[in-house]
Every structure is written in C-alpha cells, then in structure tokens.
Image (cartoon, helix red, strand yellow):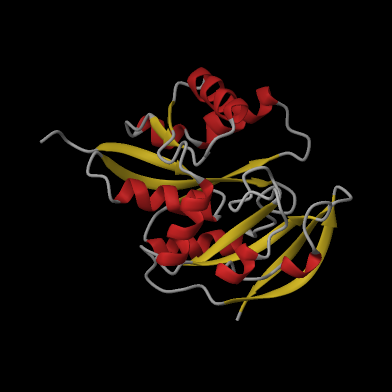
Amino acid sequence: MSEAIPIVVLSSGGKDSLYMLETLRRDPAWRVEALVTTVNETNRRVAMHGTSEALLEAQAMSLGLPLTVIGLPEACDNREYERRLARGLAAHREAGVDHIACGDLFLDDIRRWREQSFQRMGWRPVFPIWQTAPDRLAQQLLDDQWRIVITCIDTEVLPESLLGKDIDADLLNRLPAGIDPCGENGEFHTFVCDGPGFDVPIDVVPGERVLAHERYLMVELEVR
C-alpha cells in the first residue's frame, strides 16, 4: 500500500470545508496536515462568513489540527492574494507538502481561478467534493447530525429570520425557490460547531448583527 499524501485544507470554517475535511480524513490516500484560513487582516474575520479568528482556533483545536491563518488586505487583487498565500504556506511547502484541498462544489470559474492561482504558487489544488450534488450533501450533513449555523445571508434573496439559525430539515424546506441548499451561489454562509471529527462541540449563540456591502447581513457568534 502506498504512503498517504500530505495535504493542507483551505477552510472557511463552514460546512463545505468541514465536509471536505471529513472526506479526506476517511480516505487513506491522504494525510491532513493542517487547516489553512484567510482572514481580513484588519478585523481578523473570514470574508463573507464573518467568522472570528477565535472561533476558527476553537474549531481547529476541537478537530485536533494545526491552523494556519493568513491575513489579507481589505482590497486584495490576485497578485497580492497569491503573494500572501505563498508566504503563509511557505512552512508547509518547506516541510514537503505541495497539495492543497479546496471545497468547491460546481462553480467552474472559481475552480479555474483556484487552479491557476495555486499552480503559479507551486501548489497542486485538489477538489475532493467537486460535483457533489448540493441536495445530497445537505441531506448527508443532516443525517450525520452536524451542527451548522448560518452566519451570513444575502438579504436580496433570503429573509433575515434565517440568520443565526441552525441548519435543519425544516430550515432547508423553507428556503425560497431557486436557492441552492448549500448556498453555493453565495446565498448564505455558515460555521460548523459540531460534527464528525470534533472532540468537543463549540457552543455558540447569535449576537450582534452587521450589514456589509449593503446587502450581506452577518451575525457575531458568541461562545456560551
């Protein structure tokens, strides 16, 4: 049997990232070395998700994995993004890791952009859950009893009442027509508090709400 390939996981702390992580952990072909997350270097939060660095650290600790946090400027073009990531990933690269996992499902343009960017940085991008049907993924998360909280919504397509709610069967059934059940088109973003691989759950409650870019409403999750 061949030796497992070391890989780092690009993670937002949300459901697609964590499902991808669990997929890799169950596959003997891979050995996950660390989680890698990008945050706004000013507010130390994941872009669009609004998840704080403290919550990301708590999540990584519960999952038993090191966390590499890479700060990005507010206005970050592709060249600066690649420069920051290459620098932030340098220690992993020096340790012999050259594969990075991305949790995209079906957006071809995003996949092409990631492939081009990481290849320029000398990394080999891997897409473990590519073309997983969103409805099947959503049902799998319910079946495996993940606790997933909606941290951001696009107010132009979703009601504010969904913000801060746990994803369950009732919530998925109440999504407006045309909304992807995994929010792959940016309709909503999430944070995973519990699921396979967690040592202890992260007990959070919704706190302050913040409107960003005139349409995206985010909620501060507070550890209880």
Residue at point 54% right, 77% down?
203
Q: Nearer the viewer, residue 43 or 133?
A: 133
When the figure is inspected, residue 113 is found, relative to residue 12, above or below; the finding is above
Q: Is residue 14 visible?
A: yes
- Quadrant showing the N terminus: top left
When the figure is inspected, residue 113 is found, relative to residue 210, above or below; the finding is above
- Quadrant showing the C terminus: bottom right
Residue lying farthest to the front in this orientation: 177
Judged left or right of residue 212, residue 52 is: left
Judged left or right of residue 38, residue 136 is: left
- How far across and how far down the image is residue 10, in percent? 50, 42
**Number of marks present in the image shown:** 0
Residue at point 60% right, 53% down?
181
When the figure is inspected, residue 128 is found, relative to residue 159, above or below; the finding is above
Q: Is residue 168 visible?
A: no
Residue lying farthest to the left in this orientation: 1
- How far across and how far down the image is residue 121, in percent? 51, 22
Q: Nearer the viewer, residue 175 or 162?
A: 175
Judged left or right of residue 106, residue 72 is: right
Residue lying farthest to the right in this orientation: 214
Residue 116 image-quadrant placement = top right
- How far across and how far down the image is residue 4, in percent? 22, 38
- How far across and how far down the image is residue 179, in percent? 68, 50
Residue at point 69% right, 46% down?
186
